Image: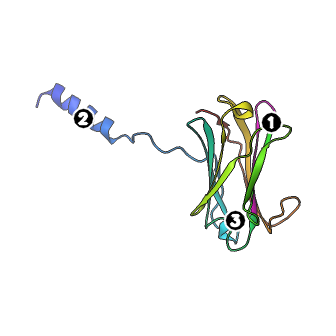
């Protein structure tokens, strides 16, 4: 094999060895096992934009809402000042949320295995290009959010830009 042929073969091997489209890393990561109820032990939250929707997949150490009902809250602020809060009330199976003072529809919330997925339209306060800041997630026992101690919480300084 000529030097040129060998060089091209090596270059092709290097290109083929590179991962194709590595999976995105979660914006929020929390230590597994730092909360005793696995269904409320936050592990990570990954924000993506898919087909005109902001999708946030929250992973727990165990199946959410087990063994007792918990309340879950996802929150962040947009670069335009929207204080967004999304809730899932495990005791009633209801999802709600949006920006304070906004008529945006609440997120759809789905449970599957060890994940909880919040899905909302990427428009209005969450339009493409909007930066989401101060991402946080809290789980609290008994379905009560305000002032209830003892839940797991994760916060991050990492941001997410809608549409990226």
Give the residue drawn at x 62%, y 63%: 32
- Alpha-carbon neighbours of circle 1 within 10 Å: few (<14), some, or many (≥20)? some
Q: Which mark is residue 82?
A: 1
Q: Secondary structure at mark 2?
A: helix
Q: Which mark is residue 136?
A: none
Image side of residue 7 versus residue 46, left or right: left
Span shown in magenta:
71-82
Q: Which residue is mark 2?
A: 10
Vertical comparison of 116 with 20: above or below:
below
Give the residue drawn at x 63%, y 56%: 110
Vertical comparison of 51 with 64: above or below:
above
Whether residue 75 is in magenta: the answer is yes
Label 3–label 2 contact, CB within 8 A: no
Residue 14 lies in quadrant: top left
Image side of residue 98 versus residue 121, left or right: right
Q: Which residue is mark 3?
A: 40
Q: Secondary structure at mark 1?
A: loop
Image position, residue 100 (x, y; %): 84, 40
Image position, residue 57 (x, y; %): 61, 51
Q: Can residue 29 be seen in the rendering of this structure? A: yes
Vertical comparison of 127 with 73: above or below:
above
Residue furthest right in the image: 147
Q: Viewer-nearest of labels 3 and 2?
A: 3
Q: Can residue 85 be seen in the rendering of this structure? A: no
Q: What is the C-alpha distance between the residues marked 1 and 2?
A: 51 Å
């Amino acid at each position: 094999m000529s030097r040129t042929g060998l060089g091209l073969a090596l270059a092709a091997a290097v290109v083929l060895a590179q991962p194709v489209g590595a999976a995105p890393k979660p914006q929020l990561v929390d230590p597994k096992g730092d909360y005793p109820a696995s269904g409320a032990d936050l592990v990570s939250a990954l924000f993506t934009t898919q087909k005109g929707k902001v999708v946030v997949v929250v992973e727990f150490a165990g199946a959410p809402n087990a063994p007792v009902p918990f309340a879950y809250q996802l929150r962040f602020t947009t670069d335009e000042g929207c204080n967004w809060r999304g809730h899932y009330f495990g005791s009633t199976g209801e999802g709600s949320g949006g920006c304070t003072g906004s008529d945006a529809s609440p997120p759809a919330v789905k449970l599957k295995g060890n994940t909880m997925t919040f899905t909302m339209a990427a428009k209005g306060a969450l339009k493409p290009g909007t930066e989401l800041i101060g991402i946080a997630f809290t789980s609290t026992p008994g379905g009560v959010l305000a002032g209830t101690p003892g839940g797991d919480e994760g916060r991050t300084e990492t941001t997410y830009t809608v549409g990226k």
